[in-house]
Structures are given as C-alpha cells and as structure tokens.
Image: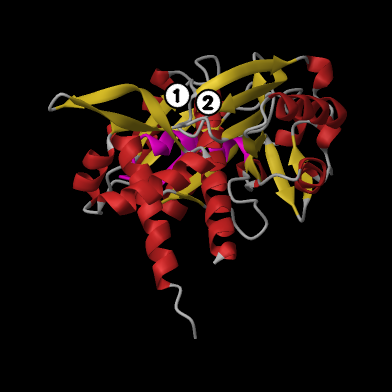
Amino acid sequence: MKSNKPQHIRENNLEYIEFLLKKYTKLSQKELAQLSGLSIVTIKKILETLLENGSVQESDNRSITGGRSARLYEYNPRHKLLLVVQLTETEEQMRGFYSICDMQGKSIHEEVASENALSWVGISTRIRELIDRYEAIAAIAFGVPGVEVQGKLKVIDFPSLLNFELEKNLIKQFDLPIVIENDVNAALLGYSSSFHNRESIAVGLYYPMNFPPGAAIVINGQILNGKNGLAGEVKSLPLEAKWQNYPRIPIDIEKNIREVIQTIISMYDPDRIILYTNPEMVSSNQLKQIEEELRVIYPYIDLPVIKISTFFTEDYMKGLIVRGLETIEDADRFIGNDEK
C-alpha cells in the first residue's frame, strides 16, 4: 500500500506556517525558517502554495537587516469569508441580521433585515445578493430560534419557517457548506469561547419577552444536542408553567427559573449557568432569592456560578461565527483529504 506520509507532512507544514503568520502578523522567509525549523527551500515552496490559494499575501512593509530588505509575509484573513444569518427576538419583535466576517471573525459588513423580508423568499434573495457581492464567501452560518428535526424546522418562533426544510434548501440554492444552529446553543457557545473551555459544563437559559424559554448545554466546548436536537427544550418540562398560553396568560417567571435551574443542577451539575434575560423579567435581587432557595435544596454542594446577562444577541452572533469558521476549516480539511 502506498504511504501518504509525505503528503501528511506537507499539509502539516502548510498549516503550521499559516499558524505562525496568524500569531506573529508579519514574518520574513528567514524568520519563518527559524521559528519552524524548516529549510529556506521548504519555506519558499510552502509560501508559493499559500500565496497561490490566497491565504497568505506579501506585506507592503519590508524587513531591513544588515542593510538589505527582505520581503515580509502576512496572513490574509479575507481570502475566505463567512456569511452569518441571525434570526432573533429584539425589542419584542422578530428580526433578522446579516453579517459578513473574515477568517479572524472580524465583521466587514452588517445589516438588519426589514420585517417584511423575513420570509424564505426574502432571506434567500438577500443571501444570493450578498454572495454575488462577496465572492469569497465560503460558508453560511444560519441561526434560528428553534430546532430542526428530521430536516424540518419543527420548533421555531418564526411562523413563516415552520416545517420548512432549511438546510436542504440552503444547500440546493447556494451549494456552500452550511451550519444551522439554535439561538441559545450559539449564544452559550459564543459565551463559552471566551473561557477557552476552562469550565467543563456550562448551561445557558434564555427567557425572551414574548416567547417561551430555551436552554443550551455545552460540555467541554461541545454543544449537547441530543438525538433529535431537543436537548434544552425546557418549556416542555413537567412544571406548573403552561408556555403554550404565554404571554396571554401570565407566568410566575421567578418560580419557573428556580424550578428550571433546580432541574439543571440535578441533571448536569454545571460549573456555570448564564441566565439571558432583562431586568423587567428577573432582577439581581430576585436571582439572589433564587440562589438562597437553591442553597436550602442543595446544602451539601457549592452552587454553580449563576449570572444574569443582557448580551444574548451579541453572544448569539459570536457563537454563529465560531461555528461558521469551524465549518470552513472542516470543509478545507475534507477537500485536502479527498485530494490525497
């Protein structure tokens, strides 16, 4: 059997040189050779490949050593772009946001969708326009306040997309790598990314103004989805609250939050719980009261850190960017392995 080892070594070298340029910003061939331990000849060949695929570019600056100037190379974060589509509740209304990000997660274009453009026709039309405008778009990350079950959006706060085959239609129309993520999952992933997986178990609870709550569980940096993607559907817990009648029939939010947190502690024993809501629904004083009640229930443990956050939309977008960039990198690895 023919060995692929030399090809694996080459791919590893390419990734390592790209990593060095991301870390040190600008480097010469000599500096790359010193940092990597590779020969100048190998560095030149690697740079030729990276320059050709656009992931690396020559810097406008030059390094002056010993009276001679040397070319500097830098990572090009815009050689591939990510399109993020985010559907969410903002100011008690359902809204859509579009963002174009580079490979370092920096946004280069942002816009808000008009309310009458949140149907599939409106969304797909705008996606096509953005792809035509930004030809480097390499993947789409799509965030939804709901769950896709067996290929269809079965649980979603956007009535126009209920039972819609979102992933199938995205792939069919745009022929790009696609990742679809639940809003609370993405928000918690975005929050957790700031901690570099230092906490083994984190849980996010989201209580929007006019819709039922949702939850997400991240274990060692990985989202727990469950068999059907329903992990975190706390509105279906056998508790007193009847969310199908909300907000028409009021619910004791403080009591429900305490009951849901108690359930989560018993099931997952997390390190941290992030409660995404606003002061109108639960205040810091109410949270303190909830924690006191939980200490009575669990006198033998240290409670998880429980924190109220009003940055749901920001963490949600951050999480979609994380998932989208991972999707691009996974697609690159798949293509590389396929070529081998």
**Which residue carries the number 1 mark?**
309
Give the camera-side residue of 309 and 339.
339
Whether residue 297 appears in this view of the structure is no
Q: Identify whether 149 is placed above or below 185.
A: below
Does 183 lie within the magenta span? yes
- Name the one closer to the observer, 153 or 97: 97
Gap between marks 2 and 1 measured at Cα: 7 Å
Contact, CB < 8 Å: mark 2 with mark 1?
yes
Q: Residue furthest front?
A: 67
Q: Position of residue 216 (x, y in %)?
A: 53, 43
**Label 2 SS:** helix
| Residue shown at the point (48%, 30%) measured from the top left | 105
Q: Is residue 243 above or below residue 1?
A: above
Comparing labels 2 and 1, the label whose residue is closer to the camera = 2
Q: Dot 1 lies on which element?
A: strand
Image-based side of 38 in relation to 137, left or right = left
Q: Report the number of numbered marks.
A: 2
Residue 245 left/right relative to 41: right
Label 2, residues with CA under 10 Å away: few <14, some 14-19, many ≥20: many
Residue at x-position 33% and y-position 37%? 21
Instruction: Give residue 201's position: percent from left, percent from top.
Output: 39, 48
Quarter holding residue 316: top right
Q: Range of the magenta residues?
A: 182-204
Mark 1 burial class by Cα count in 10 Å: few <14, some 14-19, many 20+: some
Quarter of image, res 24: top left
Residue placed most toward the observer, 207 or 45: 45
In the picture of the structure, the residue carrying the numbered disc 2 is 312
Amino acid carrying label 1: it is Ser
Q: Residue at x 64, y 21 (%)?
A: 209
Amino acid under disc 2: Phe
Residue 56 pos. (x, y %) = 43, 37
Residue 189 located within the stretch drawn in magenta: yes
